[in-house]
Amino acid sequence: MEFVNIALAKGRLAEKTIKMMNNQGITFPDYHTNSRKLIFENDFEKIRIIFVKPSDVAIYVEKGAADLGVLGKDILMESEADLYEVMDLGFGSCKFAVAALRDYVDLPGKKIRVASKFPNVSKKYFNELGRPIEVIKLNGSVELAPIIGLADVIVDIVETGKTLEENGLVVINEICKVSARLVANKVSFKTKMNHITRIIEGLKRGAE
């Protein structure tokens, strides 16, 4: 039987996923949170986990280097990768939201300057509203953009809203809720269906 490769990003999502597998007796003997290794195997179950950057999980799965992957719905939406979204793993919950300064006034028909780490999500959302926008791609501290006049609004992931509040911003629209998702390569889902199905069922039981 071939190995099933699962792409994970180190951090909370990986820890939760591994715990779910551990709950079903699937362990990786060499694995510990401080290890610098990138690949760990369970020879008996023929499961291999590989650690990649969060933004690369969808790429590894789409291209077939990994059969399965765990990533946030936010990254999945932004990547627009061609793969199967298999299940909501039920953790890592937060939301996509549009936020602005408290005194922001939206003028209908006016082009909106949107700062975000998620340009594809931003374009799709505002296009569906029929609103013209200019997207300003930032890699961090998007809350700063409205404060210094770089943008009118931001599109970002909001968990508690504390960072927004501390910087004088408020949520003006919620786009959608996001959480950790299990995704599969389309070819692998067919060629390794039995093996992948067992893993999926194990993750479901591990979440209970």
Image: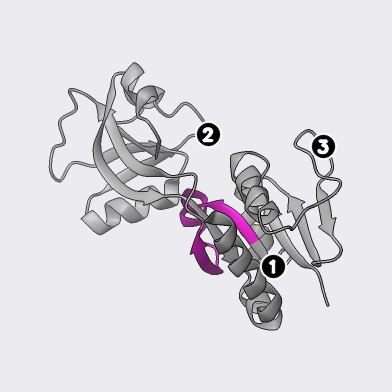
- Helix, strand or loop at mark 2: loop
Decide which of tag 2 and tag 1 comes sooner along the chain.
Answer: 1
Q: Is residue 94 magenta?
A: no
For badge 1, the amino acid type reads Asp
Question: Which sits in the foreground, 177 or 16?
Answer: 16
Indicate the quadrant where residue 163 lies.
top left
Mark 3 residue element: loop
Q: Within 10 angstroms of label 3, few (less than 14), some, or many (20 or more) residues?
A: few
Tell me if residue 33 can be seen. yes
Q: Tell me which segment is drawn in magenta.
A: 69-88
In the depicted structure, whether residue 12 falls above or below residue 129: above
Amino acid at circle 3 = Ser
Name the residue located 64 percent from the left edge and 82 percent from the top edge.
Answer: 190
Residue 81 lies within the magenta run: yes
* x, y percent for residue 31: 81, 44
Of callouts 3 and 1, the N-terminal one? 3
**Which residue is denoted by mark 1 in the rendering?**
67
User: Dot 1: within a 10 Å radius of its alpha carbon, few (fewer than 14), some, or many (20 or more) residues?
Assistant: many
The residue beneath circle 2 is 139
**Residue at x 15% of width, y 30% of height:** 105
Quarter-of-image position of residue 207: bottom right
Of 52 and 25, the residue lying toward us = 25
Q: Are dots 2 and 1 in contact, CB under 8 Å?
A: no
**Mark seen at residue 35:** 3
Measuring from the top left, give residue 86's x and y in whole percent: 53, 68
Residue 121 at x, y percent in the picture: 40, 51
